[in-house]
């Protein structure tokens, strides 16, 4: 069910942006259960997770699916430091907040990553 909902969200977001490939950040994406299928559809996916073992599994799954994704070790609350100023069209955060030390800090970082794409688009439109 989660996949079906997210796939609809991604399709709608792609139509809204006019681009077929979105920049997606999967926070706490672990072994790539959501990230790999989106990467297999051609999206640019970055998985952020604190576990190097989970990230290695995500990369293996992506390779088996013939997809490419970026795996970055890090925490949700430090998302800006982990992915830098890279703007995301969509940030996925599924089954994460119950495991982080500060859900409020994690949500602030996630909101910042998602908002950066909107700020970039607004700047281009004002030029």
Image: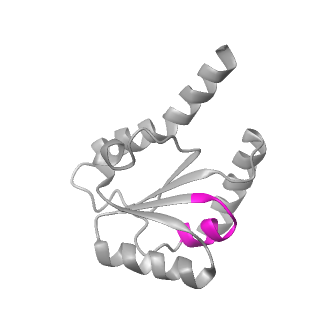
Counting from the top left corner in percent of width and height, residue 43 is at 64, 59
Q: State the residue lying farthest toward the bottom.
A: 64
Quarter occupied by residue 51:
bottom left
Left or right: 21 in relation to 50: right
Segment tinted magenta in the rendering: 34-44
Counting from the top left corner in percent of width and height, residue 12 is at 74, 49
Left or right: 76 in relation to 86: left
Query: Is 53 one of the magenta-colored residues?
Result: no
Image point (62%, 65%), residue name: 38
Image point (74%, 46%), residue name: 19
Is residue 93 among what the camera can see? yes
Quarter occupied by residue 124:
top right
Q: The N terminus is located in which quarter?
A: bottom right
Q: The C terminus is located in which quarter?
A: top right
Counting from the top left corner in percent of width and height, residue 50 is at 28, 64
Image point (55%, 80%), residue name: 63
Image point (41%, 80%), residue name: 57
Q: Is residue 107 above or below residue 73?
A: above
Q: State the residue lying farthest toward the top.
A: 127
Front residue of 12/49: it is 49
């Amino acid at each position: 069910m989660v996949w079906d909902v997210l796939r609809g969200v991604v399709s709608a977001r792609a139509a809204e942006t006019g681009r077929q490939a979105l920049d997606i950040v999967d926070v706490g994406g672990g072994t790539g259960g959501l990230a790999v299928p989106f990467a297999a559809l051609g999206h640019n996916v970055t998985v952020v997770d604190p576990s190097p073992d989970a990230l290695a599994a995500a990369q293996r799954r992506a390779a088996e699916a013939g997809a490419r994704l970026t795996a970055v070790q890090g925490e949700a609350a430090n998302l800006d430091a982990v992915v830098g100023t890279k703007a995301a069209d969509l940030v996925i955060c599924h089954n994460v907040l119950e495991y982080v030390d500060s859900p409020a800090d994690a949500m602030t970082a996630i909101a910042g990553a998602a908002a950066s794409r909107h700020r970039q688009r607004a700047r281009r439109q004002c030029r």
